[in-house]
Amino acid sequence: MKPFRRLAIVFNQQKAGAPELAQELAEIARQTGAKSKVTGTRNLPRGYLKGCDACCVVGGDGTLLGVVREAARQAIPIIGINQGSLGYLTTFSADEAHAQFADLIGGNYQLGWRTLLDCKTGLRRRDLALNDVVIKDQINSRLVRLEVHADGNLVTDYNSDGVIFSTPTGSTAYNLAAGGPIIQPEARVIAMTPICPHTLSDRTIIFRDHVKLKIFNRSPDSRLLVAMDGQRNLVVTDGLPIEVTIARHQLALAQRCDYSHFAVMRTKLKWTGGYVGLPPAK
């Protein structure tokens, strides 16, 4: 693969060891002839990654989610190094980063492409999400009634605590906790999962890649809260429908050449399999 010669390294100042590791990686990059800039600001300003070949994130998945919009707009991959807890997206450990960073930025990696959601919440307000778009009442304990249309056709209305619109990447996050399915990350679909619906037959619906979803607020005197990746919240009061589609942008994640999504799932979710001494399945 193409070497990374100009890097941005973003670290989470709240994670123990992250600032030191970021500086160590910057030194490794310098020794290989690559240039880097280091910042502890996780919500990158627009244009910060312009001219970079890749963005290295040192922290947890939340830190990575904070740089997704800018990386997708600049069409550069993210290298995720886990200094958090679970680390579904930040797949390199600190030890692996020390041992493999020079080889990785030298071109020894593969790219995993991830679907993003485009959410329009007004005439000129739109945003990107890697995990999910969550729509609920601004008052957390209040029931909300949401009417969903797909390509102009009524799907249903939900009386629930809210609705999650998830990418395959986000299927192991809030979607999974709400009873939604796990989806292979390469699939270009949207999972719509109601949160604690009052009708027991309401279950997750999987929509195709070119679907255009519109969500109408049918609760009188209700103000909707739209949460993007659990980080950026917007209160919607103008009465216009919220639109959710698959974005034209995709996000690239730089991964080890032997990276396996299901090996990560087995580790993080404590699934069984991969027994030592048995031949691989044919």
Image: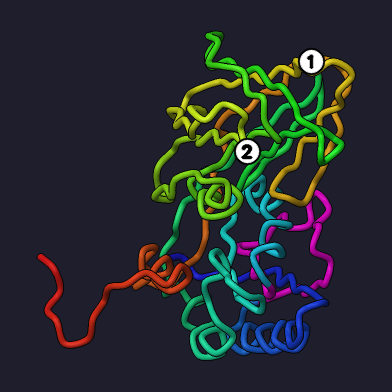
Q: Nearer the viewer, residue 91 or 262?
A: 262
Q: Amino acid at mark 2?
A: Cys
The residue that disc 2 covers is 196
The residue that disc 1 covers is 240
Mark 1–mark 2 distance (CA, rounded to whole Å)? 25 Å
Quick check: is 53 in the magenta stretch? Answer: yes
Asked where in the image residue 64 lies, by quadrant, the reply is bottom right
Q: Earlier in the sequence, mark 1 or mark 2?
A: 2
Please determine whether, in this image, residue 31 is positioned above or below residue 86.
below
Q: Residue at x 75, y 19 (%)?
A: 217
Which SS class for mark 1?
A: loop
* 222 displayed left or right of 230: right
Q: Residues within 10 Å of mark 1 (few under 14, many from 20)?
A: some
Residue 244 position in % (x across, y down): 63, 28
Quick check: is 63 in the magenta stretch? Answer: no
Which SS class for mark 2?
A: loop
Q: Residue at x 82, y 42 (%)?
A: 233
Residue 186 position in % (x across, y down): 40, 48
* 66 displayed left or right of 221: left
Q: Which mark is residue 119?
A: none
Please determine whether, in this image, residue 99 is positioned above or below residue 204.
below
Viewer-nearest of discs 1 and 2: 2
Residue 171 position in % (x across, y down): 51, 49
Magenta stretch: give its range. 35-59
Q: Nearer the viewer, residue 183 or 187?
A: 183
Image quadrant holding the N terminus, namely bottom left
Q: Are marks 1 and 2 in contact (CB under 8 Å)?
A: no
Q: Residue at x 44, y 32 (%)?
A: 206
Residue 101 position in % (x across, y down): 54, 82
Image quadrant holding the C terminus, namely bottom left
